[in-house]
Amino acid sequence: MVVASSASALPLLRESARAQAAPAGGPFQLAPLPYPADALEPYIDARTMEIHHGKHHAAYVANLNKAVADQPSLAGKSAEELVRQLASVPESVRTAVRNHGGGHVNHTMFWEMLSKGGRKEPRGDLARAIDRAFGGFAGFKDQFGKAAAGVFGSGWAWLTVDDQNSLRIESTPNQDSPLTSGRIPLLALDVWEHAYYLKYQNRRPEYIDAFFHVIHWEHIEERYRKSR
Ligand code: MN
C-alpha cells in the first residue's frame, strides 16, 4: 500500500506543478508590466506596482476567466469587446464581466499610460484639443485632478473622447469603463486605495500630483490619433 501510494503521488505532484506554471485557465492572460516594477519610483513605488499588477490585476484576469467559462456565446471575444458590449453579455455573468472584465481592460490600459522621464505636457493635436476643451493644460490638470479626488470610494478618473470627437473628463465607480458608454479612454487614473495606499495612505491628492509626473504623453497622443 505504501509503495502504491508513493508511486501515485509523483504524477499528482507533477500535475499540480504543471497547473501552477500554466497560464490561468481560460482565454485571458495577464501580460507582464511594460517596464520594471520600480520604473516609476519615487512617484509610484515598486511594492505597490508588484501587488497592484501581480495580485489585483491578476485576480481580475482569473475572475474574468471564471465568468466566461461555460458561456459559449462569449467565446472568442476580447476583453475590450466584452466591456463595450456589456448589454449583450448574458445576465447571469454580466456583473462579473462588468467588474472583472472592466478591471482587466482598465488596468491593461493604465500600465501603458505610465512612464518616467518623458514630457510633462502633451503636444500637437492633443495639446490643442485640451486647450480648446479646458482652457489650457493647467485647466485640464485642475479639472482632471478634481475628478480623481472627487471619486467617492473606489473608481477611476478619465480623459475620454466622445462620439462628437470632443474631449471629456469623467469618473467611474468600481471598475466601470467609459467604453461601455461608447467613449474612448485616452488617459486613466486608478484611484482605488490599492493603487496608492502603501506609499500615500489617505493622501490621495499627493498620489494624484505624483501621477502627473509619470504620464506617458507620447502614448496618450497616439491614443488620441487612433481615436479619430
Ligand atoms: Mn487598480
Image (cartoon, grey):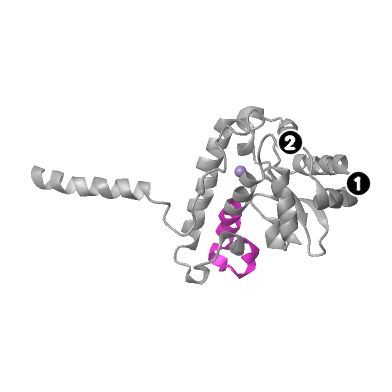
Whole-percent x, y for residue 20 in the image: 36, 46
Q: Which three-letter amino acid code belongs to the residue tagged 2?
A: Ile
Q: Which three-letter amino acid code belongs to the residue tagged 1?
A: Gly
The residue tagged 1 is: 135
Q: Is residue 147 left or right of residue 67?
A: right
What secondary structure is the stretch in magenta mostly built from?
helix
* Some atom of ligand 1 lies within 8 Å of the CB belonging to the residue at label 2: no
Query: Ligand 1 quadrant?
Result: top right
The residue tagged 2 is: 208
Residue at point 86% right, 50% down?
128
Whole-percent x, y for residue 71 in the image: 48, 68
Bounds of the magenta segment: 83-103
Q: Which mark is residue 205?
A: none
Query: Mark 1 Cα within 10 Å, few/some/many (few <14, many 20+)?
Result: few
Mark with earlier residue (2, 1): 1
Question: Is residue 42 visible to the viewer in this orientation of the structure?
Answer: yes
Residue at point 65% right, 39% down?
115
Q: Is residue 67 left or right of residue 221?
A: left
Residue 92 magenta: yes
Distance from disc 2 to disc 1, alpha carbons, whole Å, reads 20 Å
Q: Is residue 204 above or below residue 34?
A: above
